[in-house]
Image (cartoon, helix red, strand yellow):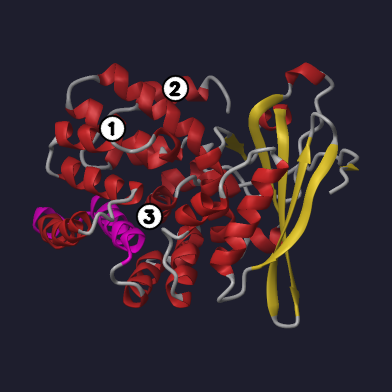
Amino acid sequence: MTPTPVAPEKKSNSKLWFGFAAVFALIAVIGFYLQGSNTAVNEAPPQASASEEPEVTTSYLSLEPRYVHVIVEQEVLYDDFKTGVVKTLLDLLKVYQDVRIIYNGPAAKFAAHEIRFASSTSQNRTYLEIEYVNRISGHKHLDRKYDITSPSIKSSLKRSLDDLLDSLHIEIDKEILASHVDELPSEEGAIEAIVTAYASTYHAHTQGRALELIQEAEMHSPDNPYVIATNYIYNLSYLYLHPKGDNTEAINKLNAEAAEKFAVLESQNKVTPKVMEAMAMMALSKDDALLAKNILQTIPHQRKTVLFYVLNGKAAELSGNRDSAEEFYYNAVIEASSTLVLNLSEVLFFNSDLSDIKSKVKDSSL
C-alpha cells in the first residue's frame, strides 16, 4: 500500500468523552458507578465532537511512539454496539503492542500514532471504517472498512487487527491473532450482546442494560469462558456498587455459583486471563489478598488491563501496603485515561480513602 500524506486538521473546541473506559470489565463498573453517583457524573469530562484532533506539535522529537491518539466519529460514539467493537479491537491491539491509548487531553498532541474510527452502511450491511496515520512521517498507512454485521464480527475483528498491526510494522502469526479473538463467543447473538454491553452502561437511560445483555450472551454461549467471567465480574461489581443493606448473602451465593463454573473451566484447561481476573475478584471478595495476588501474577504481562491494576491495588491495601496500592492505582488511571477509576477503587470490596491520590491528579493533568 502506498502511504498517502495527510494534512493536519484544526482542533475542535470540544472534549471527547469516549476515553471513560478501558477494559471490558471496568467499563461495566464505570457505568454502574455513573448510574448511582451524581458526583461521578459531575466529574466526567464534557461531551464533544468526536472529530476533535489536537494541534500537531511543532517539535518533531516530542512525538511519543507509545502514544496512540484515538478519534471516534459521532456515528460510532453514540452507538453502543459500534463503540464496543472499537474498544474490543483496541484491547486486542494492546496485547501485541505496549501502547497508551489516549482519547483527549494534553498528552494527545504528543501521540506518534493516530487511529480514526467512523462507520457507514451499504446494502443493509454496517461497516467500521478505520484510518491510521503515522504522525512521525505524516503518512496514512491504513484506510479500510470492515463489515461488522452478524455473522462477520469476529472475522472482521481478526482482519482489522491484522491490518492495524501490519500498519504499525508488527508481524504476528495469524494463528496467534485468531486464538485471542476466539476467546470471544462465536455465536452471533452472544458476541453482539457482549460487545454492546461493553458500552451500554455509559448512559443513564440504559440502566441495568449491561446485565441484561450479559445474561443474553450467557443464554447463547453458556460455556464460553469469556462470557462466564464477564457475567461474574459485572454482577459482583453491581453488588458492591449498589448494595441493598448487607449483601453478604448475595455475594456468597454468586461466589458459590461462579466457583462451580470456574472449577469446570480449570478441569478443561480453559482458564483465560479474563477468567483469572474474575477468580482474583472472588478471592478479594473473601478478603484473601494472598490468593488474589498469586492469581494476578499468573496473568501474562501483555494481558494486563485496568481491572488488573485496580485489583492489585485493592490486594495491596488489604495487605497493608498503601504505597504499592498507590502505584497500582496510578497505572489504572493512566491505562483508563480517566480518573473515574479512583472513585470506583474507593468502593470496590471495601472502602478506601484515595483523596490524597485524587489531589495529586487534580494538581496535574492527563
Residue 282, compared with residue 341, is above or below; it is below
Q: Residue at x 48, y 76 (%)?
A: 188
Q: Vertical placement of 32 versus 137: above or below?
A: below
**Mark 3 sits on what residue?**
32
Which amino acid, by three-letter code, is at mark 2? Ser
Q: Determine which of the numbered discs, if any, sits on residue 297 in the image.
A: 1
Q: Where is residue 104 shown, x and y percent of the image? A: 65, 38
Between 268 and 322, the one nearer to me in the picture:
268
Which residue is found at the position 38% from the left and 38% from the top?
343
- Of callouts 3 and 1, the N-terminal one: 3
Dominant SS of magenta comes to helix
**Which x, y percent locates residue 322?**
26, 20
Left or right of 217, for residue 228 = left
Residue 166, compared with residue 205, is above or below; it is above
Of marks 1 and 2, the one in the foreground: 1
- Give the residue number, with chain letter if any, for mark 2: 359
In the rendered structure, which segment of residues is drawn in magenta? 224-250
- As for residue 103 lying within the magenta part, the answer is no
Of the residues under marks 3 and 2, which one precedes in the sequence?
A: 3
Q: Report the mark closest to the observer, 3 or 1.
A: 1
Report x, y in % for residue 83. 58, 59
Q: CA distance from mark 1 to mark 2?
A: 30 Å
